[in-house]
Image (cartoon, rainbow, N blue to C red):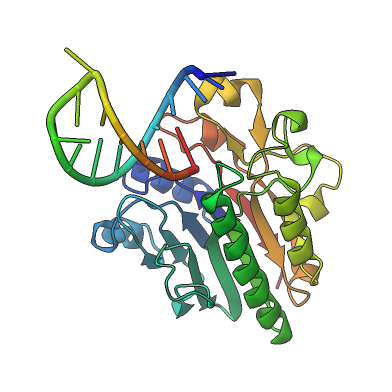
Amino acid sequence: MKIATYNVNGVNSRLPVLLRWLAETAPDVACLQELKAPQEKFPEQAIRDAGYDVCWHGQKSWNGVAMLSKAGPIKEVRRALPGDPEDVNSRYLEAEVNGMLIGCLYLPNGNPAPGPKFDYKLSWFKRLTDHAAALLAQQVPVVLTGDYNVMPAELDVYKPERWVDDALFRPETRAAFHQLVAQGWTDAIRTLYPDQKIYTFWDYFRNAYGRDAGLRIDHFLLSPQVAPRLTAGGVDRHVRGWEKSSDHAPVWIELKK
DNA sequence: ATGTCGCGTTTAACGCGA
């Protein structure tokens, strides 16, 4: 079973690229972030015509997450993280697919830091960590994937010294990620490639992709009931080079039965 | 400080978020 995550940065602008990538790589499940589309403007029919069941939580202008599956129907479990009913941002979608619990998340960027946006990032992180602990306690197969907006280590940044004050790399942010993983999750891509430079995002600015000035911020966390099934994973980095590409590339893992 | 996208509306010699 192949599961992918892709921050599309605008699902309607990205539709030709998204459909081309789905046809080329055929993930069983695809988690999308940054739809940037209201609920009623999601391209449902085009996704279904491509052979996928789909569930999405849109929002005007910003955020928005979706889950696509051709491995069986999607049974939605929740469309928000618990812990703050006031938080109306569409950043989390959780569903059961083919006997597995999958969380699709878009963690806040948090810049500029410090400031209220960074506080929101850390409080969202805390809610994610609390919810993740509850999921682990269920002792079932869980995959938490999406755009975490965190580079967990220096190896995940093309020039770490330039990023130490950024919300994606500040000590508080890295500590929050490590605290989450330390609950018992497996960072799938880093586990497969312990020493390699692997990026999932290249800024639109300054020819970042051409210079390979990238960041690793899209991640898969696997519960202990899934981790032993991990056989492969990678980044479809060539997709970042396509015309009208997102600033992220799709990332994927393969799980054996 | 800068650059480039996508979205929204003020339809731009724009504003915001990323």
Residue at position x 51%, y 60% from top? Answer: A31
x 70%, y 43%: residue: A169
| Total numbered labels | 0
In this rendered view, identify the residue nearer to me: A209 or A109.
A109
Toward the front, the furthest residue is: A115
| Left or right: A162 as drawn, with respect to B2 | right
Which residue is at the front of the view, A134 or A220?
A134
Asked whether, in this view, residue A135 is left or right of residue A97, the answer is right
Q: Is residue A84 above or below residue A170?
A: below
Q: As drawn, which residue projects farthest toward the bottom?
A: A138
Q: Which quadrant does the N terminus of chain A fall into?
A: bottom right
Left or right, residue A175 beside residue A146: right
The residue lying toward the viewer, choosing from A120 and B12, is A120
Q: Which one is nearer the viewer's eye here, A59 or A3? A: A59
- Visible in this render: residue A131? yes
Q: Residue A47, located in which quarter of the rendered image?
A: bottom left
Place of residue A19 in the rendered image (x, y in percent of width and height, measured from the top left): 40, 48
Tell me where residue B10 appears, x and y as whole percent.
13, 35
Vertical side of A111 occupied by A161: above or below: above
- Residue in the picture at 30% in, 61% down: A44
The residue depicted at 79 percent of the width and 45 percent of the height is A153
* Residue most extreme to the right: A195
Can residue A4 be seen here?
no
How far across and down, in percent of the image, does residue A226 sit? 73, 72
Which quarter of the rendered picture does the C terminus of chain A lie within? bottom right
Q: Position of residue A166 (x, y in %)?
A: 65, 39
Q: Quadrant of residue A42?
A: bottom left
Q: Is residue A219 left or right of residue A94?
A: right
